[in-house]
Image (cartoon, coloured by chain):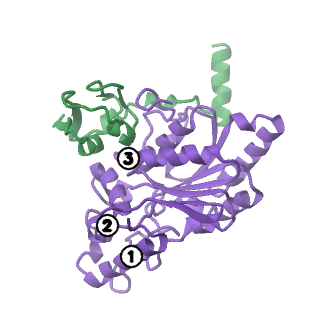
Amino acid sequence: MPIGVKTLFSPGHTACAGCGQAIGARLVLDTAGPNTIIANNTGCLEVFSTKFPETAWGVPWIHSLFENAAAVASGIEAALKYLGIKDKINVIAQAGDGGTADIGLQALSGMLERGHDILYVCYDNEAYMNTGIQRSGLTPFESNTTTSPPGKESLGNPRPKKPMPEIAAAHGIPYVATASVGYPQDLQKKVKKALSIKGPKYLQVHVPCPLGWRHLSNLTFDIAKLAVECGLYPLVEIENGKLSQVRKLVKIKPVEEYLKPQGRFKHIMSLPEQIKAVQQIADNNIEHYGLKS
Amino acid sequence: MGFRMEAKKIYHNIGIAKPESSKANKTGSWRVEAKPKFLQKNCIACKMCVFICPEGCITGEGKNTFICDYDYCKGCGNCAVICPKKDIEMIKE
């Protein structure tokens, strides 16, 4: 589908102004094209795109429960295979980070292990935004959420992000990738590549949330880009369990630049020790994935 | 009445919605402060505004042809920030 002419994810959905997830969903669907069936977990994306009795999707789309988009998609794929038309149709299962890393992990793991020909897309906005910013398994270190508030006893979320791409790759699946809405062309390229591969695929897309991250609505793109540029969100591709490609960083930025515009990290901006701890995570990523060019 | 109404009733009962029916929500009324103005002077057709619009309401193909559908634009301002030629500016409603 040529971009800028027509979109399959139509306007009129009820996402907040500047929603990163809406950008991600549109880019993924427009790249996949009209021959696509989508199974969706519960989450922000499901709620804002399908305000009953309306829907923003221009393709067949089903929502069942919070945890089972991967299982529903597995059933769809098996049915298409039985009818002998799987080669013509892409099946996409998609969810937010809570529906992927916490609640839907079991169904996702089953889908990856059984080897269904499905692309699983996780829109990672780093907390349960739909229900009011509760901490999830993919919430970053020291982020302020309603269930990990900073105060005398704590400095926000005490645990680092769950390494979901590695967990998915450990299943030995053909394609695992991370992408970001800060790099739209890169995201489209990865979706295209994933859909050209047979077997289970996992794609994790970093999507800023102006409401939950407490940044200005016009900074969605900049913040997504900064997360990649400082090394906190490495863009990698893992094929058959082996790291095949990483996006090299020409100029590595300090994490302060990424943390500063966001209200969820406001409490650590006056604590240099804590910023150092976040910088350490970025440095570890840079070393682990070899992001330095 | 007739078949169409009947079909509509069944659709509602089992929870099926018509594709792209969300276009009935004119979310343009959400804008509070500013709206983007496409100057159409220095546009190089990089399409970054189209990529980044959360509503998907920006359309256009060649240079200086891009426009935004104010029926749906929520005024987030991402297009104005991203434009490399500063060809989009936010103006007061």
Looking at marks 1 and 3 on the same chain, the residue that comes earlier in the sequence is marked by 3
Q: Which chain is purple?
A: A
Q: Front-most of B13 and A177?
A: A177
Question: Could you tell me how far apart the alpha carbons at marks 2 and 1 are, in whole angstroms?
Answer: 10 Å
Where residue A232 appears, as percent x and y from the top left, is 40, 68
As drawn, A224 above or below A280: above
Q: Position of residue A203 (x, y in %)?
A: 56, 55
Instruction: Give the amino acid at mark 3.
Output: Cys
Residue depicted at x 20% and y 35%: B87
Circle 1 packing at 10 Å, graded few (<14), some (14-19), many (20+), is some
Q: Which residue: 66% across, 33% down?
A: B13
Which label belongs to residue A231? none
Tag 1, which chain?
Answer: A
Please tell me the numbered disc located at residue A16.
Answer: 3
Chain B drawn in what color? Answer: green
Lateral position of residue A175 relative to residue A135, left or right: right
Q: CA distance from mark 1 to mark 3?
A: 33 Å
Q: Which residue is labeled 2 in the image?
A: A252
Q: Quadrant of residue A52?
A: top right
Q: Which residue is mark 1?
A: A283
Residue A142 can be seen, yes or no: no
The x, y position of residue A200, in whole percent, is 68, 53
